[in-house]
Amino acid sequence: MFGKLTLDALKHGPIESGVSYSVGIVAIIVITLLFYFKGWEGLWKGWITTLDPKRIGRMYLIVSLLMLFKGVVDAGMIRAQLAFSVGESHGYLESNHFQQIFTAHGTSMIFFVGMGVVFGLLNIIVPLQIGARDVAFPFLNSLSFWLFSVGAILVNLSLMVGNFSGAGWLPYPPLSELQYSPDVGIDYWIWSVQIAGIGSLLSGVNFFVTILKMRAPGMTLMRMPLFTWSALNAMVLVIFAFPILTVALALLSLDRTLGMHFFTTDGGGNPMLFVNLIWAWGHPEVYILILPFFGVFSEVVSTFSEKRLFGYTSMVWALAAITFLSFLVWLHHFFTMGAGANVNAFFGVMTMLIAVPTGVKVFNWLFTMYGGRIHFKTPMLWFLAFIFIFGTGGMTGVLMAIPPADYQVHNSLFLIAHFHSMVIGGVLFGFFAAYSYWFPKVFGFTLNEKIGRYAFWCWFMGFILAIMPLYVLGMMGATRRLDHYDASTGWQPLYIVAAVGIIFIVLGVILQNIQLLASIAERRRNRDYTGDPWNGRTLEWATSSPPKFYNFAFVPEVHGRDAFWSMKQAEKAGGEHEHHYEAIHMPKRSGMGFYIGMWVFLLGFGLIWHIWWLVALTFLGMLIFTIIRLSDDEPEQLIPASKIKRIDLTKRHVHNGHS
Amino acid sequence: MKAKYLLGILFWIVALALAFGLLYKHYDQIAMLNPKGWVAEQQKDLMWLATWLMLLVVLPVFIMTGWIAWKYRASNPHAKYTPDWDNSYLAEAVWWGFPLLIVSVLSVVTYTSSHKLDPYKPLESDTTPLKVQVVALQWKWLFIYPEQKIASVNLLQIPEKTPINFEITSDAPMNSFWIPELGGQIYAMSGMRTKLHLIADQPGEFAGSSANLSGVGFSGMRFTTKATSQQGFDEWVKKAQSSSQSLEAKSYEQLAIPSEYNPVALFTLKDPELFETILHQTMQME
């Protein structure tokens, strides 16, 4: 009746039980508060069923930040284990549990934090930046978000029901095959990533079309802001790379559920086929994560230097070059497989080539600053830290692109230090820069600058202490994913330094929370009435903060790059002209994304636990709900010009959510 | 204000000096930088060469970042503000060209070193190489010496200054065979034979491990590589040949049962084809 699911699946050690109970308590508190404040209707109408990309974007960010919290806790547990698990002592975690933790850490950070902040930012900023009122497929956007959330829920459910994968964030066969991992851990991983991945693919198509088809009149491709350009490139990568992930996971799940032999060692399967497929997706994936933040830094540097971006054309071509090359380098993740010297050399050289356009971007950012008037607001601090961390991380990256050097450092902590430099220094610091840069646009008030600086310094110091020792540990022979080591290795002091680094990072996280609370408390003082707190250059600053649900009452006309900057210049010259309000088509809200998401959640649960009647039922449910949605003849509504006028003329700072 | 910045700079100088000072003091503990064999030596030189070449670009970037950020700070009235200066073909040519030049040099280095240090390529030496077959098990390493008709678990005994020809496979999830002081790693995969050629230039004990996650006992997959004189090696072989434990199909089955933190064990090898049997077992029809 319940497949592999028995009551034993609920039995856990003290740590998981503690987490389960705290999640339960928080859920009860939230539900009680919702009843108390009668928040259900607002939650349902304003958020769960919304098709407004600005709101969907905020929901992405909330899920991502929750997962980031989980990921940081995982990292802390990993470091705490390794600081003391030496010689006679085997630490406080058993191997099995430790391996689930680092798997959850990687999975959460890449699939649910990285992808979440990318799509969160794209949702909020891209339509505003291209002068659009919406995305191309508003309903698909909501569905993507719910698929993403279902993936995140499944990862967390594994804490309470059953267990998670212990095979690493990319579970290589044959370890991930039934032969060596018979329990449901790998299945939890497969289905949460599969479902979230399909959501990402749909989002990729959505934003690709949005950027190509919905730009404001006059915004030619070569007038698009760099963030939009970087988003476009990332979406190209999503569209080409994610189907590979979908297929690789589908084949692995066929092996595991139907006893097939794609990646098994026997029956004619080949585990290295999975490794090839997963990295053919995996390397473009890291560029999907980083490219949008290259875009963020382009905006930040240009805005806070009060200067046009240097070498715009070069920047665009550099993005395109990185996008193209990122599909030709996947084999550098396994030079040690034993491919021939020519094959390894080819992939090594392709990898190094990526350093050229990336270097060009760095030089262009520096020369954007050159001759500018630089204001060192927190986003600029994140940028400067990014340059140093990304510079060293880039160097070690090129080092590892030389196959014989990689034979030494492959899978050692040296590699871990390298990619954490790229992901923390690039993606996370990029996100923090974007967070303080666009926060006033989204919420209508600026963040507390002083606490933001303290948080920055904690993160920066924490990063250096937590990650730099890993380079040395790697060179001393420490491999990744160890849960114990000999005293004779001499690694312990460095592991302790790394653990201290995590304490600083946690301090940074706490300060960021304090910053948010303090900024909310003093929001009246920091209100942004102008919609343009930083003297911005691109169209998102042309509308109110926060923007109305229709983004722009009048579709802006673009006459050059830095569209808003030139508008402001023209206004100074007295070029203001009259507009009349027009009726606007907006999508109606829809609960179907949520409903379909919930069917998929149950479908995933059924597939993980082999509850076949549930699989059949939920698949049918999903199908029927999709058909119902597709049969909706009037998904849009017309908002009359008079209403637009009324909303637009009310005070700019009055929040006017669409519901 | 000024004092704060000076203090900040001082802090970073002291911190960096301390970090590099400690590294210098403990330099001899960093395995990769203190190679004990030709292969690891070459790989170390390669890493330094690449690092210096890259610093030619990265160091100027770091210095420029600090200098530009300082000079063009908004509070500096002496810096010239040129808000619309956004293009220079000369500058673009420099920073597309110069990194490309460095990468070209590195590409040549990559191509030649990939061939020179191809792990499948036998090492040049006057001494006859020693053949060692390696099997990654759950969770221990089995070393088979087919010519000496012995085998050992979690102990790799080798003569110094003798090329070792490794043939590697796995009867477990994928592992990676790595002895950092002697040279880089290669994967151990079931049903596949990978090759690695290493040499120890001096006697000593070198740590080896698996660099690829292979299940719960993965952290215990450590072994010691003992390099001795030829004489010392011969003595060890004799000791192993007189071991009471022997290895053939049946005792191998016992050995292959998953176990963690396995102690060292020595065997006489009864079945000289054992490695081939393990290698081909996945090819048999069920």
Image: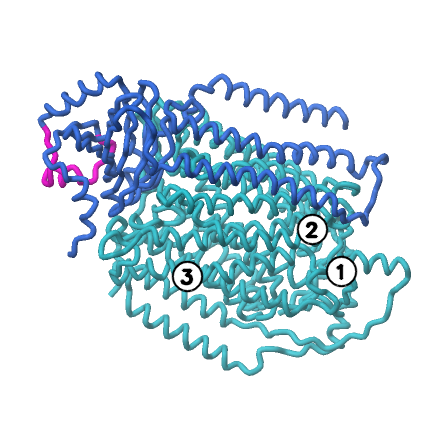
Decide: marks 3, 1 in contact (CB < 8 A)? no
Q: Amino acid at mark 1?
A: Ala
- Sequence-wise, the earlier of marks 3 and 1 is 3
Q: Amino acid at mark 3?
A: Thr
Q: Colour of chain A?
A: cyan
Give the distance between the C-alpha atoms of the residues marked 3 and 2, in whole angstroms: 33 Å
Foreground residue, B13 or A402? A402
The reply to whether residue A387 is in sight is yes
Residue beneath disc 3: A246
For residue B252: magenta?
Answer: yes
Residue beneath disc 1: A542
Local crowd size for mark 3, using a 10 Å CA cut-off: few (<14), some (14–19), many (≥20): some
Q: Quadrant of the N terminus of chain A?
A: bottom left
The reply to whether residue A428 is in sight is no
For residue A218: magenta?
Answer: no
Could you tell me which secondary element the residue under label 1 belongs to? helix
| Mark 3 or 1, closer to the camera | 3
Disc 2: host chain: A
Q: In the displayed structure, would residue A550 be above or below residue A281?
A: below
Residue in view at x 52 percent, y 54 percent:
A115
Decide: marks 2, 1 in contact (CB < 8 A)? no
Q: Position of residue A283 (x, y in %)?
A: 48, 50
Q: In the displayed structure, would residue A235 be above or below residue A16?
A: below
Residue beneath disc 2: A299
Query: Is the same chain shared between marks 2 and 1?
Result: yes
Q: Amino acid at mark 2?
A: Glu
Residue in view at x 77 percent, y 59 percent:
A564
- Sequence-wise, the earlier of marks 3 and 2 is 3
| Mark 2 or 1, closer to the camera | 2
Q: Which residues are magenta?
A: B245-262
Residue with the most extreme front position: B126
Q: Colour of chain B?
A: blue
